[in-house]
Image: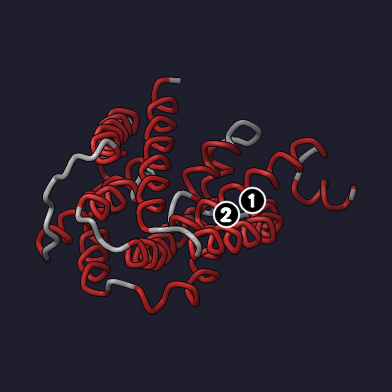
Amino acid sequence: MGFLLEQVQLDALDLLYVLFCGSVAGLCRGFAGFGLSALVVTSLTLVLLPVEVVPIALLLEMISSLVMARMTWTAIHWGLLKWLCVGAAIGVPAGVFLLKIIPADPLRIAISLGVLIASILLFLGARFRVKESGPKNLSVGLISGVANGAASLGGLPVAIYMMAAALPAEAVRATMNLYFLILDAYGTGALVLAGLLDQVTIARALLLVIPVTLGIYLGNYIFQRSSATHYRYVVLVLLMVLSVSGLIKSFT
């Protein structure tokens, strides 16, 4: 036990907290197809520095996407995914550039507030009549890329767009899963170049693989036994929680 605590540089109580947070984040990821990195960053920054947590979240997102690939592969909306990735490839560098010239908090507030309002309206039964199309998919990918590069919130615009377009739950979950694998592989490559993946970070990520994976399988089990209506409401509540977390983070 002492050797493990030394490798991850945590005390016993913090270790239990980190494992619990990983399990909950994995559960949400397995059910909804997104939310892991936002939940990991929000919860683990209570015991670790943000610069230590973000690389862990990216590594866990990639591992989670690989774990879920077999569960979701046949339901992927390839047309949507293609344009999301093209838009994100353009948007991520633009977001990083924006981060250099303006603070991240104003953009995080704008994205979080917009997603929160849209989530509440959709939860209350509003219909935005959004019809999916190539140009719209590309635009959402661009917005997602900018949000990810500047504020690490790339998943929220995509999730709310897919909810507004009323896509099937299986397609939402599967497409988000592979999209995150591609987007986070991009981000992880940048972290490697920046020298932010050290031995302790990798040890902490490996520590969380088991609880996150168990959470994913439990989340997938619940998803398989849930209705499309249940999925929609749970995802909208999750989006509200993540949006409020983003607002709290910006004002503290």
Q: Secondary structure at mark 2?
A: helix
Q: Give the distance between the C-alpha atoms of the residues marked 1 and 2, in whole angstroms.
A: 5 Å
Left or right side of 131 for 63 = right
Nearer to the camera, 173 or 9: 173
**Residue 23, numbered circle:** 1
Q: Secondary structure at mark 1?
A: helix
Q: Amino acid at mark 2?
A: Gly
Task: Give the residue drawn at x 78%, y 51%.
Answer: 7
Residue 136 percent coordinates (x, y):
12, 57
Nearer to the camera, 12 or 2: 12
Q: Amino acid at mark 1?
A: Ser
Residue 199 percent coordinates (x, y):
68, 56
Task: Give the residue drawn at x 36%, y 58%.
Answer: 228
Q: Are marks 1 and 2 in contact (CB under 8 Å)?
A: yes
Task: Give the residue drawn at x 41%, y 77%.
Answer: 73
Neighbour tally class for label 1: few under 14, some 14-19, many 20 plus, Cα within 10 Å: many
Q: Count numbered badges in the picture.
A: 2
From this viewpoint, which residue is outermost toward the right? 2
Nearer to the camera, 26 or 15: 26
Residue 38 percent coordinates (x, y):
47, 44
Left or right side of 73 for 171 = left
Task: Give the residue drawn at x 32%, y 67%.
Answer: 171
Above or below residue 171? Residue 54 is: above
Q: Which residue is mark 2?
A: 26
Colour scheme employed for the rendering of this structure? secondary structure
Above or below residue 125? Residue 62 is: below
